[in-house]
Image (cartoon, coloured by chain):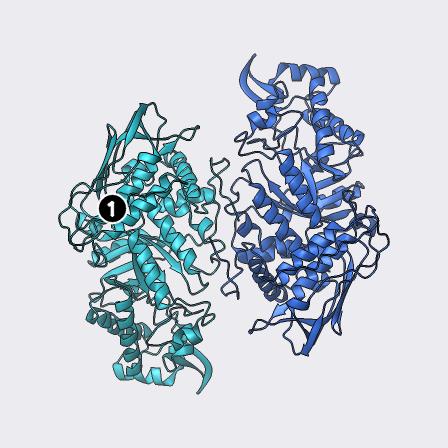
Chain colours: A cyan, B blue
Amino acid sequence: MCSVNPGHCTLIKYIFLLLIIIHLGLNTAESVWPLPQIFIPSPERYQLKPQSFSFGYRRYLDTKHSCSVLDAAFKRYFSILFPGYSYANLITFSVATQLLFLNSYKLSVFAGQASLNAETVWGSLRGLETFSQLVYQDDLGSYYINKTEIEDYPQFNYRGILLDTSRHYLPVQAILKTLDAMAYSKFNVFHWHLVDDPSFPYQSHKFPDLSNKGAFHPVTHVYTQSDVRRVISYARMRGIRVLPEFDSPGHTKSWGKGQSELLTPCYRGATPSGTFGPVNPTLPSTYQFMLSLLKEVASVFPDPYIHLGGDEVDFSCWRSNPYIRAFMHKMGFGLDFSKLEAFYIEKIVNITSILRKTSIVWQDVFDYHERRKFLSVVEVWKQGCYLCEVRRVVKAGLRVILASPWYLDQPGPTHNWARYYNVWPLAFKGTEKQKSLVIGGEVCMWGEYVDATNLSPRLWPRASAAAERLWSNERQTSCVERAFPRLQEFRCKLLRRGIQAEPLYVGHCKHEYQSV
Amino acid sequence: MCSVNPGHCTLIKYIFLLLIIIHLGLNTAESVWPLPQIFIPSPERYQLKPQSFSFGYRRYLDTKHSCSVLDAAFKRYFSILFPGYSYANLITFSVATQLLFLNSYKLSVFAGQASLNAETVWGSLRGLETFSQLVYQDDLGSYYINKTEIEDYPQFNYRGILLDTSRHYLPVQAILKTLDAMAYSKFNVFHWHLVDDPSFPYQSHKFPDLSNKGAFHPVTHVYTQSDVRRVISYARMRGIRVLPEFDSPGHTKSWGKGQSELLTPCYRGATPSGTFGPVNPTLPSTYQFMLSLLKEVASVFPDPYIHLGGDEVDFSCWRSNPYIRAFMHKMGFGLDFSKLEAFYIEKIVNITSILRKTSIVWQDVFDYHERRKFLSVVEVWKQGCYLCEVRRVVKAGLRVILASPWYLDQPGPTHNWARYYNVWPLAFKGTEKQKSLVIGGEVCMWGEYVDATNLSPRLWPRASAAAERLWSNERQTSCVERAFPRLQEFRCKLLRRGIQAEPLYVGHCKHEYQSV
């Protein structure tokens, strides 16, 4: 899970940013969320003048391509640092292309300059975020930054947020806003649970009827190809990968509306009942369709991973259907429908491999199948002893993404943020090698009760608690009481940046959220 | 509780609104929330043309004053009915002034006209709201209304929402937005819990230090006199009273910062500990201050009621203070500090009477004092058998506002809206006269975990469930399953009007909320 979609400016040996610093003075303690691995603050402070502040490059390896990602980031962070000022200093510069997803960086603020040093553009983005959090204003409105030394890298490479656009349609703006906020907490994967039972908003160019008939509305409640490109590009500019999920064979009711003979007809006795169950795994046409759809998905989404779902398959409809039962008999599956499910999933995983993508599945696929060697990455989502499950998966030599403790769609008082903070993904008995298979974690924002009206306050700042767990050193961030004031301050920063992050407890921010 | 601040156009014997209706056609069933008392829909429908639509008056009693309330409502509802069209048809008209708070109206849509008939301007506002909910668009964007007969009036006269601006400061815009949404659900009282322990945002002209020192910030986190006037006027235009609460003697920590010697110094042994407890009830200066403050409040807030709080008084500080103990001894209160509290509250209630205002108190005041005759209205807020408490209060001949079942600041899944719907305020053994003392109910949105970032989705549409309980006939609205689709549709209307109301369950609205 350490790669990213190809693009320019991914290898930059040293990126330095320079800033004009005027004045030395005293300080109040400042904080960064998530906490950097090595963070040496100092009371010595320097004043920043927006008029004379600029970002710049110091050294790079190649001059063949312009680095649009960093140029855009400079503009973005200038606006975040100095609201109301405009940044004219546009420099284009060039670097060679290479696939890397290193997020490490070094940041040094000292003697009138700040230098940011990163192996990759993605690390530079993380460093810019940290830099932006170090700058603060005094009561008179002057900007300051303290002398600081930071060396930083993430604890886990996969730090994801799942949004569900099937149970409720999320306007593209709501997704982009979430990507902004994700970057502020150093999340790096947007897991897009695009389609599910209630609606199919993805507008496929090969199968337009899927959304024409399966979306809540074929025009206003769909993601066009252009919408999807926009989301992917917006995410990439912020160092965020977009992982598409096309969950099957269950959770596919909406697929059936635009693709006849895909779903299994359920039977009442000897006659079809008129309702439909999971994808029909017995027909060759099913796999032709899935190959064709996934081929499109593989080309539209540049990420090397595809999430295939595979969770919560209800066997009752398969069981009711005489043709399915006949197929089971022919294949020698007996009455064990999980074998039929495995048969289906293996074929879909193979299709994904042919398309040169790696598949991720929900833990159900791992749990209910004996043959597990065809799997790569398993996402653990069930409640209960989720670390027991993590241990089982890594013992089987597979990689794990942990989601169970971060089901944030469940409403709850904000003060239970500590519940999402006090999670220890590696607290199981296992070898170092096994633990290294835990590649990260994911906040799940399922859509039963969530849409654009409540997405932001339900996510933020609770998801930021998970973000620190996934980025920072476990030993330095084990104390909820010490984290609390930092998270409160970070939440105020989110408000200042226009993110509708709800309060943790009684109190105030200098700049409150202004509703419209 | 059936009066309102004095103003123009409160008595209008007949208000008629006329609309130009063009076309007859077929229909889909339409709904109104909260459900009118008598509602006779019909499949016959009429088309509305925004270009030729107008509101107008048919008959009125007096022509001395212009009715700004209804003129403004016509403009507002025109925009709600036909977004994107502008309304040029401004008529001023005049009516006599009288104090009434009747909310009843009759609405008839028939043969190319709609007529709205109300005793008061406030009833007209309710009727306009109902009218606006009857209009709908077909898929081509044409507007329709069905032939309809409605006779309507509220079940309870007091239908309140409490906002807490002390634990978090709510920008004025967030309050105004809430008032908009309140009018859509026919709420008629904004209970403004202005001040409390954490902050004192009310900017008093007599005691400016209260907010200078007691607000979170003396400039950005206060309500100026002009802010307060704006809120009151905005509310009045929507038929909503503003009930101010100045809770004492507990919940007053923030008061002490700007008003020395008001709070009781707590003692550790024989010396003051440096901390402060409730208002000091033993000093004459306390009552001089309270008279002066409440006199200001009485003049700033035109509502004939003032909420005096009186809840959750902690006796430990009073107990620690030797001067308080000496006073207790002198007064013959023994060790019963609730007698001291009663002594204080009686004096404050008397001050309120002198100011010609009626006082409302939290149930604690009723519960802990033997002499209850000085009380008028008691607000029941504690959980448990709240109807037992309601019964005790009405048996004592006092009026009741019920808040216990509507503590909406507690986060919870939206689908528990039914919990706020299945409330039966009169389901206790009592005489008709006793039941008539239950004047209404109130949704409480305490501020520990709520500010402008999450206020709207936490309130709406759950508060609307309470609104129907307080407005509509209990027998016609006893079935949650029948209410569900109507509430879903009403929630879509709220979105269309820019209210950030969260979803009840999986699904969609024609116009989703567009985040910014």
- Indicate left or right for B270 with A336 as reference: right
Residue sitting at 62 percent across and 65 percent down? B486
Q: Percent from the top left, x then y, of residue A401?
A: 29, 55
In the picture, residue B384 is in which quadrant?
top right
Residue sitting at 22 percent across and 57 percent down? A7
Residue sitting at 25 percent across and 60 percent down? A377
Q: Which quadrant is the N terminus of chain A positioned in?
A: bottom left
Given residues B355 and B248, the one toward you in this image is B355
Q: Determine if residue A8 is in view.
A: yes
Crowdedness of circle 1 by 10 Å Cα count: few (<14), some, many (20+)? some
Q: Which amino acid does label 1 sit on?
A: Ile
| Chain of the residue displaying label 1 | A
In the displayed image of the protein, which residue is found farthest to the left? A61
- Indicate left or right for A447 with A423 as reference: right
Q: Determine if residue A108 is in view.
A: no
Given residues A18 and B194, the one toward you in this image is A18
In this rendering, the answer to whether A368 lies above or below A145 is below
Given residues B429 and A342, the one toward you in this image is A342
In this rendering, the answer to whether B57 lies above or below A149 is below
Q: What element carries label 1?
A: loop
Q: Percent from the top left, x then y, of residue A145?
A: 32, 31
Q: Mark 1 points at which residue?
A: A91
In the displayed image of the protein, which residue is found farthest to the right? B61
Q: Percent from the top left, x then y, of residue A219?
A: 45, 70
In the displayed image of the protein, which residue is found farthest to the bottom? A270
Given residues A173 and B288, the one toward you in this image is A173
